[in-house]
Image (cartoon, rainbow, N blue to C red):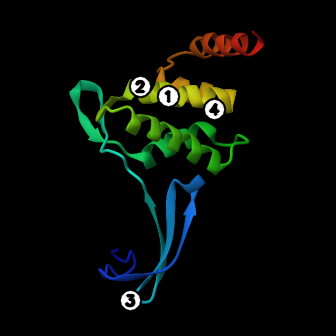
Amino acid sequence: MRCPFCAHEDSQVKDSRPSEDGGAIRRRRQCSACGARFTTFERIQLRELTVLKSEDRREPFDREKLIRSVSIACRKRPIAAPQIEQLVSGIQRQLETSGETEVGTRRIGEMVMEGLKGLDSVAYIRFASVYKDFREARDFEEFAGSVTEVARG
């Protein structure tokens, strides 16, 4: 593993432990050249996923990008970082076990919406406002109204 401080190619693992409900391994490393310590995470990846974007563009699935977008929707809400990690891990696991190597942004967005719906209604509406491209306040009103009707029903 390359050292993030001096870019030396060799480092030693000083400590390893499972994290995120056993879905990853946290490794504490020390650079043999500069002595700096840093942490890495290793995750099981069942298959390489490609995201189908608009205009037939393709890009590799980026877990960190998904975490960032969910985190933005959850900002200043009573949702802990491990809950976001668990949501994203669940989505990634579902995608990897689906048997498909290419997945559309629409499917990922729907999975995030479904997960946020059960987690926090405000985060759900925030994510939906970007995902569904709300243009006016009326769009928020209509969507929020449908959310409160579902919650009551």
138 is higher (above) or lower (below) than 41: above
Helix, strand or loop at mark 3: loop
Q: Mark 2 points at which residue?
A: 107
Q: In front: mark 4 or mark 3?
A: 3
Question: The residue tagged with tag 4: helix, strand or loop?
Answer: helix
Mark 4 vs mark 1, CA separation in Å: 14 Å
Looking at the image, tell me whether mark 4 or mark 2 is earlier in sequence order: 2
The residues bearing labels 4 and 2 have C-alpha atoms spaced at a distance of 18 Å
Q: What element carries label 2?
A: helix
Q: Which amino acid does label 1 sit on?
A: Met
**Residue at the spot of label 1:** 111
Residue 98 placement: quadrant: top left
Characterize the local packing of mark 2: few (<14), some (14-19) or many (20 or more) Cα atoms within 10 angstroms.
few
Q: What distance separates the C-alpha of mark 2 from that of mark 3?
A: 44 Å
Q: Which residue lies under the disc numbered 3?
A: 32
Question: Label 3 neighbourhood size at 10 Å, few (<14), some (14-19), many (20+)?
Answer: some
The quarter of the picture where the N terminus appears is bottom left
- Residue 123 is marked as 4
CA separation in Å, label 3 and label 1: 43 Å
Q: Quadrant of residue 4?
A: bottom left
Q: Is residue 50 above or below residue 32?
A: above
Residue lying at 23% horizontally and 32% vertically, measured from the top left: 57
